[in-house]
């Protein structure tokens, strides 16, 4: 299987400049600096690369939306990885920090940016020390700083730690947090490309997205686009967790069947139980029942199956579980992480929690399911950011595919 | 309320933090983190001192810190155990293990042991799902937990 991001991931010492350069690291810089910045943007567009953080927005297009001739501009790398089930960025940050730095240099050159920040979730303090060390090495080599490799291009990159808030992975909340405030999402438009960090044009990209850029510059957009499907190009890191024998981060070509991930790469279901459900793209996307397990793992196929690729976190659930339990845990997460700014989210997540909890305590009625759907309908697309929609996803999909799991509890109404 | 004093080393670190940003206010989270690393909590005195550094009111500092779960205003144990109970950990038995941990420490979840050595908190996803079930003790991640492994980890901390 094609390995672009994970090619050398387990090489000893990869996190050091020495080993990274021995393996061909930072070669893309000279190639890039020989081109005009716009040519790099065009190459990234042509590669078909889409944002790997969750939304899947075309990366090159995002870069080309930057407000014209407004400077300074900023680059924020979103390393807030908090989507339940997702841990691919952590592996990249831990083992291959220079790949991210190289990608950020290329993006900054292409977008004429002179300051970059890596916003890492507060719990990644250890990783921030590794990253700071890598940044120091890059400065010493002249890959960062003033007049990089004699081109007149200046860039510095800094790490910035959050302090425990899922919502700071949402790009506008991330900006507010980086500016020293509460991490509440902003109203859009204006989009960050026009008014972002410090009200200046800002590119915000996920760790994995930026890590792909060196490959595109080195090998060409066409080569990258030759992997994957017609519309979902390249490879994707997938965190496989839950009831599998070999949980782990795996790099696959877009379009690989989900069953290949579960049964081959991750070794199948633990205890040889039966697959019941899977959540393909992190807790914020709808779950699917076992009969959809052959769905190709790419943006379009998963969308056609009624879910999303999201952040690439495949959570596998076997038939020992009542889905209502899992759903309640996810609602509880969103209730805890709702920033409280928008009423439908602040109140809606709590109501969903209370109703599902009551069902689980054998105090529910059949009408509760209708009530849940009604509340979900009043939360979707009614808030500044998609956190409310994320909470709705497991509720609606669990009712759609596993209604009988809810009905189990109604059989015992009144029995505690 | 006595005045909060930053140490000489802290002042140096603060200067380096300010140098990273074009705007002072961006140093808010780094300064809160710096104070908490030294004191384990962010005291009202420290909030005043941080406000002075950033030209904002202490009330604003408090409003920001109250948004983030990693800042504490009340004393916590020497070891902060954050036990992940989110989906991948739940599927791998985190609830039972959390119960076991609480029993082992003889406290309820959310409490601190009498000797102020351990605080145990339920935590949301910490991005180590392929090592579920997992917990974070201060800055260290521990994955693939079992009851025996938890006992060993707790017993090894002094």
Image (cartoon, grey):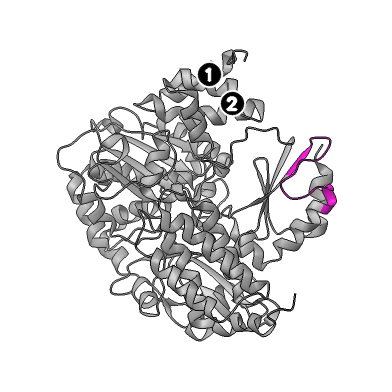
The chain identifier of the residue carrying mark 1 reads B
Q: Residue at x 51, y 40 (%)?
A: B67
Give me the disc on residue B35: 2
- On whether disc 2 and disc 1 are found on a single subunit, the reply is yes
Work out which quarter of the rendered image holds the C terminus of chain A and state it: bottom right
List the residue tagged with mark 1: B49
Residue A16 x %, y %? 51, 41
Q: Secondary structure at mark 2?
A: helix
Q: Secondary structure at mark 1?
A: helix
Residue A115 x %, y %? 32, 34
Extent of the magenta region: B103-119
Q: Main structural element of the magenta stretch: helix, strand or loop?
A: loop
Q: CA distance from mark 2 to mark 1?
A: 10 Å
Q: Is residue A411 left or right of residue A146?
A: right
Please count the marks in the image. Answer: 2
Q: Is residue A4 left or right of residue A88?
A: left
Residue found at the far left of this picture = A69
Q: Residue at x 18, y 50 (%)?
A: A39
Which is more toward the observer, A222 or A329?
A329
């Amino acid at each position: 299987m094609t390995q672009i991001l994970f090619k050398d991931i387990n090489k000893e010492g990869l996190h050091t400049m020495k080993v990274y350069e021995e393996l061909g690291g930072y070669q893309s810089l000279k190639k890039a600096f020989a081109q005009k910045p716009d040519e790099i943007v065009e190459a990234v567009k042509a590669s078909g690369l889409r944002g790997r953080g969750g939304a899947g927005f075309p990366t090159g297009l995002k870069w080309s939306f930057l407000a014209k001739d407004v400077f300074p501009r900023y680059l924020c790398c979103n390393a807030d990885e908090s989507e339940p089930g997702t841990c691919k960025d952590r592996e990249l940050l831990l083992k291959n920090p220079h790949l991210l730095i190289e990608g950020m240099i290329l993006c900054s050159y292409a977008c004429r940016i002179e300051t970059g920040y890596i916003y890492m979730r507060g719990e990644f303090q250890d990783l921030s020390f590794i990253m700071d060390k890598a940044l120091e090495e890059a400065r010493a080599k002249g890959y960062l700083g003033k007049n990089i490799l004699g081109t007149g291009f200046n860039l510095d990159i800094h790490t910035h730690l959050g302090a425990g808030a899922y919502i700071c992975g949402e790009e506008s909340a991330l900006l507010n947090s980086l500016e020293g405030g509460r991490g509440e999402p902003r109203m859009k438009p204006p989009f960050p490309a026009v008014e972002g960090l410090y009200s200046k044009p800002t590119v915000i990209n996920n760790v994995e997205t930026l890590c792909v850029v060196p490959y595109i510059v080195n090998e060409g957009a066409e080569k990258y686009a030759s992997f994957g499907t017609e519309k979902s190009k390249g490879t994707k890191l997938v965190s496989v967790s839950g009831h599998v024998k070999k949980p782990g981060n795996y790099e696959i070509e877009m379009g690989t069947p989900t069953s290949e991930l579960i049964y081959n790469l991750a070794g199948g279901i633990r205890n040889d139980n039966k697959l019941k459900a899977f959540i393909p793209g992190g807790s914020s996307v709808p779950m699917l029942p076992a009969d959809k397990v052959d769905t190709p793992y790419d943006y379009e196929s998963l969308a056609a199956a009624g879910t999303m690729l999201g952040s690439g976190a495949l959570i596998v659930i076997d038939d020992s579980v009542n889905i209502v339990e899992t759903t309640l845990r996810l609602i509880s997460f969103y209730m805890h992480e709702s920033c409280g700014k928008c009423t439908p989210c602040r109140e809606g997540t709590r109501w969903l929690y209370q109703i599902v909890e009551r069902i689980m305590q054998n105090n529910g009625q059949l009408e509760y399911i209708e009530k849940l759907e009604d509340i979900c309908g009043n939360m979707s697309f009614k808030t500044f950011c998609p956190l409310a929609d994320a909470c709705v996803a497991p509720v609606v999909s669990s009712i759609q595919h596993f209604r009988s799991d809810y009905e189990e509890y109604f059989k015992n109404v009144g029995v505690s | 309320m006595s005045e909060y004093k930053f140490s000489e080393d802290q002042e140096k670190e603060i200067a380096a933090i300010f140098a990273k940003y074009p705007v002072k206010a961006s140093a808010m989270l780094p300064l809160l983190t710096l104070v908490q690393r030294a004191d384990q909590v962010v005291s009202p005195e420290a909030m005043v001192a941080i406000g002075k550094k950033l030209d904002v009111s202490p009330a604003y500092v408090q409003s920001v810190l109250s948004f983030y779960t990693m800042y504490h205003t009340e004393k916590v144990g020497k070891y902060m155990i954050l036990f992940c109970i989110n989906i991948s950990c739940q599927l791998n038995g985190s609830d039972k293990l959390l119960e076991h941990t609480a029993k082992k420490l003889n406290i309820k979840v959310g409490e601190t042991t009498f000797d102020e050595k351990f605080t145990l908190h339920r935590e949301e996803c910490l991005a180590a799902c392929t090592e579920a079930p997992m917990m974070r003790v201060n800055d260290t991640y521990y994955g693939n937990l079992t009851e025996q492994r938890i006992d060993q980890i707790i017993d090894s901390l002094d």
